[in-house]
Amino acid sequence: MFSIPEKLQAVHEIIGNATAMASRPADSVKLLAVSKTFGADAVLAAAEAGQRAFGENYLQEALDKMIAVKAARAAFPTADGIEWHFIGPIQSNKTKAIAEHFDWVHTIEREKIAQRLSDQRPPELPPLNVCLQVNISGEASKSGVAPDQALAVAQIIAVLPRLTLRGLMAIPEPTADVTQQRAAFRQVRELFLKLQQNGLALDTLSMGMSADMDAAIAEGATIVRIGSAIFGKRDYS
Ligand SMILES: *Cc1c(COP(=O)(O)O)cnc(C)c1O
């Protein structure tokens, strides 16, 4: 069994190799540690090893964890702050707490949710960083806006005063076939380039998880969202 710091190190090595293969700078990919279902102790272990950005899918679980992490880290006043990213589906009745407690939201797929997050972002906090989630694989059950609607929705979100639209997020259909992984990520990147060409100042492609981060980095990911490769297998029971 490897410890969390050892697994984090291994993920950094994978990112380092993948960026080198793609002739990209090693620091062009940010590691988001997805801590859903794991406790504050796991977040603290990763934080002590230098990890700063954490992703959560479930609001109440995240809020409880933030309180525990903050209390534990109060003992280390010189340590850098931790950044929280919301990466789960968002219902309207959750937007207020998300706007108040998170630094980033990756999973915006409706104008109404974006509008609420902007309206509810507390004035003393910087604008909330957001990504528009796109549905690349195209199944009706999957989350995200259809690629042919992404530009129109992005243009609406980009002018909301308390949000900063940073880019696109996608969760392509899982496949072990690296060629298929890359083809899906390439579609996200092409959409991202199209949005940039239409004048949107975007810098973030949030794509790639434990099983497909190599392909995502080869296709230009700037944030990879990694859970099980850092924290181990999730137990939902
Ligand atoms: C759980 C989750 C991840 C992390 O998945 P792993 O396969 O454990 O790396 C990444 N992104 C989203 C949106 C998730 O829900």
Image: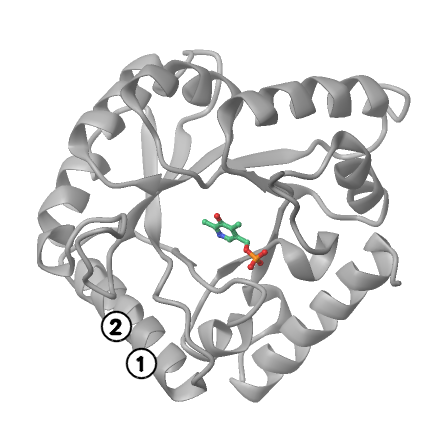
Q: Is residue 158 left or right of residue 206?
A: left
What residue lies at 72% left-to-right and 57% top-to-bottom? 230
What residue lies at 24% left-to-right and 72% top-to-bottom? 190
**In the rendered image, which residue does mark 2 sit on?**
187
Q: Secondary structure at mark 1?
A: helix
Q: CA distance from mark 2 to mark 1?
A: 6 Å
Q: Amino acid at mark 1?
A: Ala
Assess whether mark 1 and mark 2 are in contact (beta carbons under 8 angstroms).
yes
Asked whether 2 or 201 is in front, the reply is: 2
Q: Position of residue 75 (x, y in %)?
A: 90, 21
Q: Is residue 120 above or below residue 91?
A: above
What residue lies at 66% left-to-right and 81% top-to-bottom? 17
Q: Is residue 201 above or below residue 76?
A: below
Asked whether 127 or 40 is in front, the reply is: 40
What residue lies at 38% left-to-right and 56% top-to-bottom? 203
On-image quarter of the C terminus: top right
Tell whether circle 2 marks a residue whose Cβ is less than 8 angstroms from ligand 1.
no
Quadrant of the rendered structure where residue 118 is? top left
Q: Is residue 146 left or right of residue 98?
A: left
Q: Amino acid at mark 2?
A: Gln
**In the rendered image, which residue does mark 1 sit on?**
183
Q: Is residue 1 above or below residue 217?
A: above
Q: Is residue 25 left or right of residue 77?
A: left
Q: Position of residue 14 (x, y in %)?
A: 67, 75
Q: Is residue 138 left or right of residue 70?
A: left
